């Protein structure tokens, strides 16, 4: 088994999704992992990667990489962050309906960068669609993964606390002023 295959087998065997493997300067091997929806994890519930998740994967990968003879000087295991990269068909399928930002390899109508709601295309060629407003009208851009340079989720920031994507905001609290009589 080679390095990337050993990494993928280890990460998926522990129940996590392998998002990305990156080799960086000075021997850094960066592994990005994510939790899968609907799975239970030893470190607790929730949809977000925890420090404990990263520690578990790091310990297991250190052992596997040594056995496999993979050359690296430093191993970094982390979460994909709020602006998670989308790289595979499975990533796109998982995040249909979410806001995404894409960069095309070649410009389309003078633009390479688009942001909008992701949808699965229908029809003979299938692929993916991005629904967006161009300032005048609603538009739909059809694309295939091979046409993308990069794609990421648009960060959803909620200063009132974390909540799962697609979860409606809590009902507003009614405050009563004055004195009771």
Image: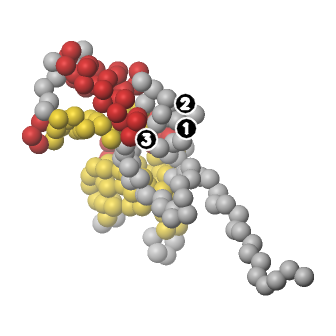
Considering depth in this image, is 67 or 105 the residue closer to the camera? 67
Seen as rendered, the residue at the extreme right is 181
Q: Dot 1 corresponds to which residue?
A: 45
Considering depth in this image, is 134 or 150 the residue closer to the camera? 150
Q: Position of residue 103 (x, y in %)?
A: 32, 55
Q: Dot 2 corresponds to which residue?
A: 40
Q: Position of residue 98 (x, y in %)?
A: 51, 53
- Are dots 1 and 2 in contact, CB under 8 Å? yes
Q: Residue at x 56, y 53 (%)?
A: 163
Q: Is residue 124 above or below residue 176?
A: above
Q: Dot 3 corresponds to which residue?
A: 49
Q: Quadrant of residue 45?
A: top right
Considering depth in this image, is 162 or 80 the residue closer to the camera? 162
Please tell me which of labels 2 and 3 falls first in the chain: 2
Q: Residue at x 50, y 45 (%)?
A: 95
Query: Dot 3, how many residues are within 10 Å of its Cα: few (below 14), some (14-19), or many (20+)?
Result: many
Considering depth in this image, is 136 or 17 the residue closer to the camera? 17
- Identify the element where label 1 is drawn: loop
Seen as rendered, the residue at the extreme left is 26
Marks 1 and 2, how far apart at CA: 6 Å
Q: Is 80 displayed left or right of 177 in the figure?
A: left
Q: Which mark is residue 103?
A: none
Q: Is 131 displayed left or right of 150 in the figure?
A: right
Q: Residue at x 38, y 49 (%)?
A: 81
Q: Quadrant of residue 12?
A: top left
The type of colouring in the image is secondary structure
């Amino acid at each position: 088994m080679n390095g990337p295959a050993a990494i993928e087998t280890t990460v998926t065997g522990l129940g996590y999704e392998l998002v990305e493997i990156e080799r960086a300067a000075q021997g850094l091997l960066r592994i990005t992992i994510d939790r899968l929806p609907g799975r239970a994890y030893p470190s607790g519930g929730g949809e977000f990667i925890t420090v404990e998740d990263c520690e578990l994967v790091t310990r297991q990968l250190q052992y596997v990489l040594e056995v496999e003879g993979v050359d690296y000087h430093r191993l970094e295991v982390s979460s994909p962050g709020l602006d998670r990269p989308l790289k595979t068909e499975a990533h796109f399928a998982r995040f249909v309906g979410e806001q995404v930002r894409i960069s095309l390899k070649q410009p389309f109508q003078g633009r390479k960068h688009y942001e909008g709601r992701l949808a699965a295309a229908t029809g003979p060629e299938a692929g993916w669609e991005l629904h967006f407003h161009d300032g005048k009208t609603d538009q739909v851009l059809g694309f295939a993964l091979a046409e993308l340079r990069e794609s990421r989720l648009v960060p959803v920031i909620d200063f009132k606390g974390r909540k799962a994507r697609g979860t409606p905001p809590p009902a507003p609290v009614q405050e009563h002023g004055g004195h009771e009589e």
